[in-house]
Amino acid sequence: MPLPVPDQLGDLPYAHLLTPHTGRLRSDERYDTALFDGGEYTDEAAGGATFLECAFSNVSLSGVRLRQGRFNEVWVQGSRLVACDLAESEWQDAAFLGGVLAGIAAHGSALRRVVFRQCKLESVNLRAATLRDVVFEDCVLRDVDFGDARLTEVTFLGSTLEEVRLRGARLSKTDLRGAVRLGLSDGHEGLRGALISSSQLFELAPQFAQALGITVKDR
């Protein structure tokens, strides 16, 4: 089941504490109950920054470097993240609603209790990341790389997967049955430990056969 996430900014439990943020983002800065509303941030360096009970509404981040950032109880709505560096970042009790993440480096990151709802993820590098209790709901995941990642209790409700890579991934209690489309470009062996439906199994059968070196040929 999807985790409960407010759809409106005013419904956040810390909404009354939010203070509008002005100025640039800074490395190793601590942002506590900050509201980022409608701003544009381009090519800024904010590595190691901490965001606690913050909200991002209709924000555009392009080329922003947030490597090793920490995001706890963060709400991101209607925002665009393009070509951002989120490698080795930590996300807990966070939500992305109706946004776009494109060309994102998030390898080695850790996501726990994170919801992506009605988002588009394209060319997102999640190699060697750790995802626990993460929900992708009504999302499009295109060219997303989960290579060598660990996925535990991850669900893909109503989501479309296209050219997703799972080579070397380790899945546990990960439920793919709700996916509208299960398009994998490699790493079919990485599905070990996942739950899939019988129709998905039938759809993936030719790719499983190829991965196992089995030739299927009717007389």
Image (tube, helix red, strand yellow):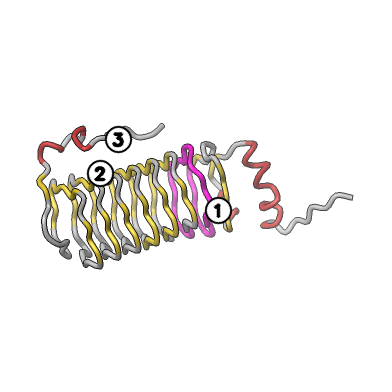
Q: Indicate the amino acid at tag 1.
A: Gly
Q: Is residue 133 above or below residue 104?
A: above
Q: Indicate the amino acid at tag 2.
A: Trp
Q: Is residue 81 above or below residue 54?
A: below
Q: Position of residue 148 (x, y in %)?
A: 47, 59
Q: Indicate the amino acid at tag 3.
A: Val
Residue at image point 17% right, 65% down: 27
Can residue 152 be found in the magenta stretch?
yes
What residue did someone put label 3 on?
A: 5
Using residue 93 as the reference point, say whether residue 199 is left or right of it.
Answer: right
Report the mark closest to the observer, 3 or 1: 3
Instruction: Tell which circle, 3 or 1, labels the residue nearer the N-terminal end.
Output: 3
Q: Position of residue 158 (x, y in %)?
A: 48, 37
Instruction: Find numbered disc 1 in the image and state the secondary structure of the residue it sits on.
Output: helix
Q: Position of residue 124 (x, y in %)?
A: 42, 58
Residue at image point 45% right, 40% down: 155
Is disc 3 in contact with disc 2, using a CB cutoff of under 8 Å?
yes
Residue at image point 64% right, 37% down: 199
Can residue 105 be found in the magenta stretch?
no
Using residue 205 as the reference point, say whether residue 98 is left or right of it.
Answer: left
Q: Nearer the viewer, residue 63 or 155?
A: 63
Q: Position of residue 40 (x, y in %)?
A: 22, 58
What residue did someone put label 2 on?
A: 75
Disc on res. 190: 1
The magenta-colored residue range is: 146-173
Instruction: Find numbered disc 2 in the image and state the secondary structure of the residue it sits on.
Output: strand
Q: Quadrant of residue 82?
A: bottom left
